Amino acid sequence: MPVLVVIPARLGSTRLPHKPLQLLAGEPLIVRVARHVTEMAAADRVVVATDTEDVASVVRKVGVEVVFTRVDHVSGTDRVAEVAGATGFGEYDIIVNVQGDEPFMPPAALTGAIGQVGLGNDVGTAAAPLDPAEVDDPARVKVVCDVNGRALYFSRSRIPHWRDIGTAPRGTWWQHLGLYAFRRAALERWTKLEPTPLEVAERLEQLRALQHGFTIGVALLDEPAPAGIDTPEDLRRAERHWRATQGATT
């Protein structure tokens, strides 16, 4: 099945203003993400979806395709859906939303999420083992799954609530990673639904899908993964990780 990856990028982040253009190891974050996803070679087409020329210009310079979208989208998923529904994109059966603040997304997360859709789920995503020291960080979204690997719930809180955290075995907590692979029909349905109470409470749009009965298959990775970049401290941590793993300099 043909696969389209869309990376939504907007400048309106409140916690990290102009986030796509913030520099990571000397290059804009959106460039790092787009290049990383393209190099994985897991998709038939990769595009950045944005509503501003500032983002488009830096992406074009590195040869990544850009699609302009409306300025009034509430979420990245809405922006992805606009691209998927545009002329020239109808051939793609699987559409993947990779968040534009995930420069260290493991290749196994992307292929695993796509594979979950291939197994018959409405949506596919991925999760990585989470260090017990980080389970109470609300920026680290946790997921619990059923015995078939489908998501039961996502939360910013510690789930499951293992009472004696020091005795919890490896694999107790899983960190949800910032990507979704959709069947085309599932993406179209998702964006037509109104936000649900759980989505509003946790500020996690994937809970809308769960409350409406979508099946979300979760690919579980073998190794931990760096968190996405939402704050200035996240960006500083990402810079340190980049230097440590790739020897890059700013």
Image: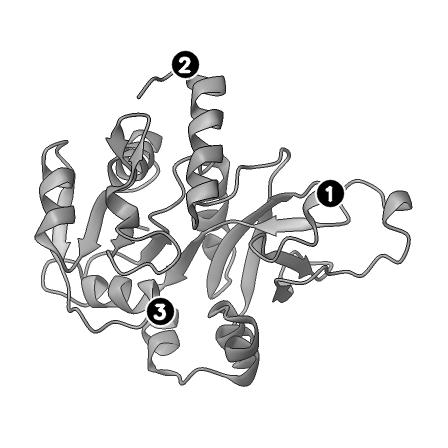
Q: Quadrant of residue 40?
A: top left
Q: Would residue 2 be visible to someone looking at this image?
A: no
Q: Secondary structure at mark 3?
A: helix
Quadrant including the C terminus: top left
Picture disc at residue 247 = 2
Closest to the camera, between mark 1 and mark 3, is: 1
- Amino acid under disc 3: Leu
Residue that carries the numbered disc 3 in the rendered image: 187
User: Pointer 3: residues within 10 angstroms few (<14), some, or many (20+)?
Assistant: many
Q: Is residue 58 left or right of residue 31?
A: left
Give the CA separation, mark 3 to mark 2.
38 Å
- Amino acid under disc 1: Ala
Q: Earlier in the sequence, mark 1 or mark 3?
A: 1
Of the pair 179 and 101, the residue shown nearer to us: 101
Give the CA separation, mark 2 to mark 1.
27 Å
Q: Are marks 2 and 1 in contact (CB under 8 Å)?
A: no
Does 50 appear above or below 224? below
Picture disc at residue 133 = 1
Identify the residue at image location x=46%, y=45%.
228
Q: Secondary structure at mark 1?
A: helix
Measured as percent of width and height from the top left, residue 4 is found at 27, 50
- Amino acid under disc 2: Gly
Identify the residue at image location x=39%, y=61%.
182
Q: Is residue 177 left or right of residue 248?
A: right
Does 71 appear above or below 244? below
Measured as percent of width and height from the top left, residue 79 is found at 25, 65
Identify the residue at image location x=15%, y=60%.
51
Measured as percent of width and height from the top left, residue 46 is found at 23, 44
Q: Earlier in the sequence, mark 3 or mark 2?
A: 3
